[in-house]
Amino acid sequence: MSAESPVQSAGFRGIQTGPVLRRVNAWLPVIATVAILLLMLLAGQLYFGDFVTPRLVSSLFDNNPYLIVLAVGMTFVILTGGIDLSVGSVIAFSGLLGAQLFAAGLPAVVVLPLMVLSGTLIGAVIGIMVAVFDIQPFIASLAGMFLARGLAYVTSLKSLPIKNDGLNWLLGTSWGGGQWYTTPGVVLALLLVALAFWVLHYTRFGRTVYAIGGNEQSARLMGLPVGRTKFLIYVISGTGAGIAGVLFASYTQSGNPLAGLGMELQAIAAVVIGGTILSGGSGYVLGSLAGVLVYGLIQIAITYMSVDSWWTYIVIGVLLLVFVVFQRALSARRRG
Amino acid sequence: MNASRIVHHRLFWPVVALVALILINTISRPTFLSITVKEGGLYGSLIDILRNSSQLMLVALGMTLVIATRGIDLSVGAVLAVAGAVSLTFIGGSSHPGDLGTVTIAVLLGLAVTLVLGAWNGFLVSVIKIQPIIATLLLMFAGRGIAMLITKGQITTINSPPYAQFASGHLLGLPVAFLVALAVTVLVAVVVRRSALGMLMEAVGVNPEASRLAGVQARGIIWIVYALSGLLAGMSGILYSSNIMAADANNAGLNIELDAILAVVIGGTSLAGGRFSIAGTVVGVLIIQTLTTSITFLGIPPAITPVFKAIVVIAICLTQSQRVRAAIGSRHRRTRQTPTAGGLGTESPIEAEKAATA
């Protein structure tokens, strides 16, 4: 939103400190997130005793696979300096669409791709608005959010149950023995993280994403395909939201017009906690994964302490504050 | 010449949209325009729109000023919830909930808390220099938690006739809520436009660093707009809680920040900052409220409202988009001498710059 972005310039000045140090500097926010994650686990272990168990680690992933997928898509968007508010509503739309199609008797092989495509479509609408018509990402994705939520209600005004083996398999199957377990949905989410990491760091497209976030004008002058890349970013985020919609439908075994309410904020929070800067150009998808885990751990810890659930909001708010101030201090130091 | 000036006024299309909405309603049901007098108050669909738009109006007013400084305030919905929670918890806990004094203290207490929350946002943005979207995101999260902490997760309901007056009372035949919003809007508009304050806000929005070097107290200005935005959200929260006579920490002001930003943008204030129009925001708020009311009025399930909102947003954004304007107005442009760069035209400096480079 703001044109002021301290880290952009800091990245260039960091060259003075040498390549190795610069790398460490860039990864510092992610390292900090992982450190906080470990500290929280340690604190939990000391406080509750039997806290860090294979079961906890497994459930940390198992509780939020859809949030991991959302955070991956959101990382792409935020890296270009954009934002995608539509993803939570897409979850509702995609889930209800699936519920209606399943109710019509279509097989999972047909329905699941269509559910994902519904997200792709919303993403494409936002992408066209941003890339072609130069509408601010905040407003364009706000329109996408209204559109998806409204379409969800058009699809069905009330919650619909889904009974389908193919969909249930995603999160209903448990792989692994004893305390260590995982589900196909979690594996899918982690594969997407790996794929995103590869795309962002080993492809031309990925470099362009960082370049746009660093300085869009320069990227354009360098002849990079800025418009096309920005369009694709929102398609990626929308598709991710579609996949998250499938996972969420599998998790709740239903489609609900209120599903995913506020989930875009959780995804944004996870990405920010993971060290990605909202003005773009700096951040890592692995950080976002760590951000989701921190988020999940806070939720689990709050359940463990059996305090009221609204403390989650406050703790997340405080944690966001700590991270933002930390990043701010970091960039100020680099600049100085 | 005059007609073209009217068509090119930045409020032309929003006002057309508003009139079109009212026309559609009137054609489908002529009773839409009728206003009746009952027990000293005016009633009717138009009056409903005025009364119901007051909450959004207050929030959007603060948002306009924040956006003028190139900021954004996502926390208003949560702050609104906090105001209701504070005031109603105070009234609920007092021994004379119907007492005028109790209600006055409760309202002042609620407003004071929201002023502090707004100032906190201003502190983060102006002193710590955190991006506005993130700085206010913090309170958007934590604010609802704070509101629930105050109400202890319950929906606090109260019975206090004076407090109920804010939402359901009438004064001189008009709804009190509308009068509150009107008075505050006029007051803010006069203060901001009759003094240099508005211009300073725009200066900060155009270029914070340059305005600071030019001697503008950018830090103070930013602080003022966020504090004001918090305070206005608090007033809106009082109206909201007075309307349902309950403090609902979960649902009070849910997504109102989005509607408010939408209203501001529809009114022609650019999110890039540096220019604002309070009149535009008023039109934007009325469009959104009329749209919501029409949907109920026309018998469409209210849940589908977002689809229509999406269509309005997309349509209005497209009319403001440079590319579309260039396509439609290319003939027009050529006949004019130069594009109005800088202060005079309807474009923000950034848009003008884009047009110049295109």
Image (tube, coloured by chain):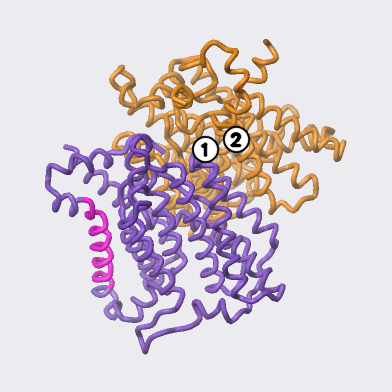
Residue A43 within the segment the image draws in magenta: yes
What hue represents chain A? purple
Q: In this view, does A88 lie above or below B51?
A: below
Q: In this view, does B338 lie above or below A243?
A: above
Q: Mark 1 lies on which chain?
A: A
> Identity of the amino acid at label 2?
Leu
Q: Which mark is residue A135?
A: 1
- Mark 2, Cα crowd under 10 Å, few <14 / some 14-19 / many 20+, is some
Q: Residue B318 carries which label?
A: 2
Circle 1/circle 2 CB separation < 8 Å: yes
**Which residue is farthest bottom?**
A178
> Identity of the amino acid at label 1?
Ile
What hue represents chain B? orange
Q: What stretch is highlighted in magenta?
A: A26-44
Query: Is B132 in front, or is B86?
Result: B132
In the rendered image, the quadrant that contains the N terminus of chain A is top left
Residue that appears at 21% across and 46% down: A330
Residue B132 within the segment the image draws in magenta: no
Q: In this view, does A216 lie above or below A325?
A: above
